[in-house]
Image (tube, grey):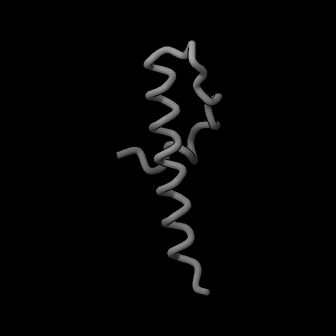
Amino acid sequence: MDLDLALRKDQPTSPTENATSEQRTNYEKWYRSNRMCLMIIKRGIPE
């Protein structure tokens, strides 16, 4: 699992209707990585 993908790579453009499956997959991987990173960071910060 590429948890640090969102930290290593810039956000790809949002896929459009004409986007290839590779572009959609790359965006979905980045988006999931970004959400996971945010959850981990929020969990590490005491309220």
Which residue is more in the foreground, 5 or 21?
21
Residue located farthest toward the left when viewing the structure as drawn: 1
Total numbered labels: 0
Residue located farthest toward the bottom when viewing the structure as drawn: 47
In the rendered view, would you say 15 is above or below 6? above
Which residue is more in the foreground, 15 or 36?
15
Residue located farthest toward the front when viewing the structure as drawn: 17
Q: Is residue 10 left or right of residue 24?
A: right
Point out residue 3 in the picture as x, y percentages from the top left corner. 44, 50
Residue in view at x 58 percent, y 79 percent = 45
The picture quadrant where one finds residue 6 is top right
Point out residue 46 in the picture as x, y percentages from the top left corner. 58, 85
Q: Quadrant of the C terminus?
A: bottom right
In the rendered view, would you say 1 is above or below 16? below
Residue in view at x 57 percent, y 47 percent = 7
In the rendered view, would you say 47 is above or below 38? below
Point out residue 12 in the picture as x, y percentages from the top left corner. 61, 31
Residue in view at x 56 percent, y 42 percent = 8
Which residue is more in the foreground, 14 or 41?
14
